[in-house]
Amino acid sequence: MKGSNFASIGITFKGCGSYLPAQVLSNEKISQIVETNDEWIKTRTGISNRRIAEIDENVSDMGFKAALSAMDMANWASESVDLIILATSTPNDLFGSAPMIQAKLRAKNALAFDLTAACSGFLFALITASQYLTSGKYKRALVIGSDQLSSYVDWQDRGSCILFGDGAGALAIEASHDQSNLFGFNLRTDGERGSFLNLYNKNLNGKIIDQIKFRKGEFSNISMNGQEVYKFAVREVPIIISDLLKKTDFDSADVDWLILHQANQRILDAVGERLKINKDKILTNLNKYGNTSAATIPLVLDEFIRNQKIKKNDIILTSGFGAGLSWGAALLKWG
Ligand code: COA
């Protein structure tokens, strides 16, 4: 039977959760700050609105709410959580924001740390957590994607500010001796093409005393070569997914749902076409929330699990891609 060849410890999916800030930034509002319009943005990206975190909200606040909701669905007590991985590129503490989520959840037995891989972050965190679980030393993990890109968007750059929004999503995953619902994964990075999408340190010089200078820690805005990122995604994502399907002995016809990182509707459509996956199987909420980086995949999962479109035992193919450059795919069964 497909997907049944698992060795000793496998992964099961127990819960999901998400959080979206209340402030809505529409295309119409963006057209008040840069030369653009609703029609252009919708046609080129599929996005109508995005959410913006409030002044007093940060990545760990949003991540906490998403994780709490995933933990509730899983029906887990806080103390039973062994591991918390927070995928984020916009931490509220560069030393690590995951331990703040651990504290808020009162998950005192958990190991908590951050992982940065931009828009592939959630997928990389999911696979990292799965390796901890299959080692046999950890049983329950919360995998969180939370990002607040609004803090780093150049709101004067119409080529990028139309794309991004804030939010968080989470999954509760558990080790199992009976089954594995994570059938396989493929992860890649290519630093040689890294300059297409960046959030660099400003590299400002400071001086401690005359003889000793230092680099100040302050980040610039997101810089992006949209066309190159677009070409990268449309080319590499179908390849990595096809490889994964082959490796796991699945066919695209076996897939119930395709959940791609929510970057641009045209990317989603092009990838779906290349893989010959019917549009009805490609789940999206991009129009409402834009690109929330590490949060997009769990945001889609949570929405469609809660509205019961995704059902227990459905086969889900997911792929993240973005800065790094980084990209990857995973094949799983919900439940
Ligand atoms: N409103 C109106 N016009 C805009 C605009 C906007 N918001 N942004 C760019 N334009 C203009 C450009 O200035 C250009 O004008 P010109 O022909 O007079 O020079 C024209 O539209 C076409 O620009 P181009 O960059 O070729 O547009 P595009 O079709 O590639 O769309 C993106 C731009 C950013 C929407 C698209 O490249 C994209 O989505 N790329 C992927 C980015 C991404 O997903 N990043 C995150 C990955 S995780």
Image (spheres, grey):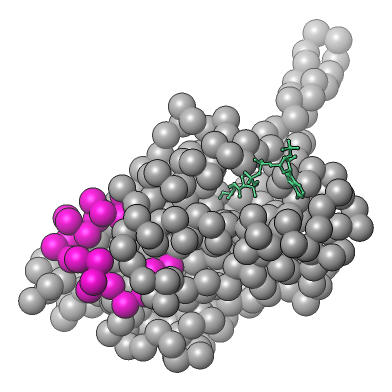
Q: Is residue 208 left or right of residue 333?
A: right
Judge whether residue 124 is colored magenta. Answer: no
329 over 239 or under it: above or below: below
Q: Residue at x 74, y 73 (%)?
A: 21
- Residue 110, given in percent of the width and then of the height, sits at 46, 68
At a point 78% along the width and 77% down the height, the residue shown is: 22
Q: Quadrant of residue 167?
A: bottom right
Q: Position of residue 199 (x, y in %)?
A: 66, 39
In the picture, the quarter occupied by the N terminus is bottom left
Predominant secondary structure, magenta span: helix
The one nearer the camera, 201 or 152, is 152
Using the rendered view, name the quadrant where residue 52 is placed.
bottom right
Q: Is residue 308 above or below residue 331?
A: below
Q: Is residue 81 visible?
A: no
Q: Position of residue 71 (x, y in %)?
A: 49, 83
Farthest-out residue, right: 32
Looking at this view, is 273 or 83 the one in front? 273
Front in this rendered view, residue 329 or 129: 329
Quarter of the image where one finds residue 27: bottom right
Q: Residue at left 84%, top 18%?
A: 207
Determine whether 305 is above or below 236 in the image. Answer: below
9 and 232: which is toward the camera: 232
Is any part of residue 274 visible from this angle? yes
Q: Give the image quadrant in which the ligand numbered 1 is located.
A: top right
197 w.r.t. 149: above or below: above
Q: In the image, which residues are magenta? A: 240-259
Residue 154 placement (x, y as % from top left): 79, 44
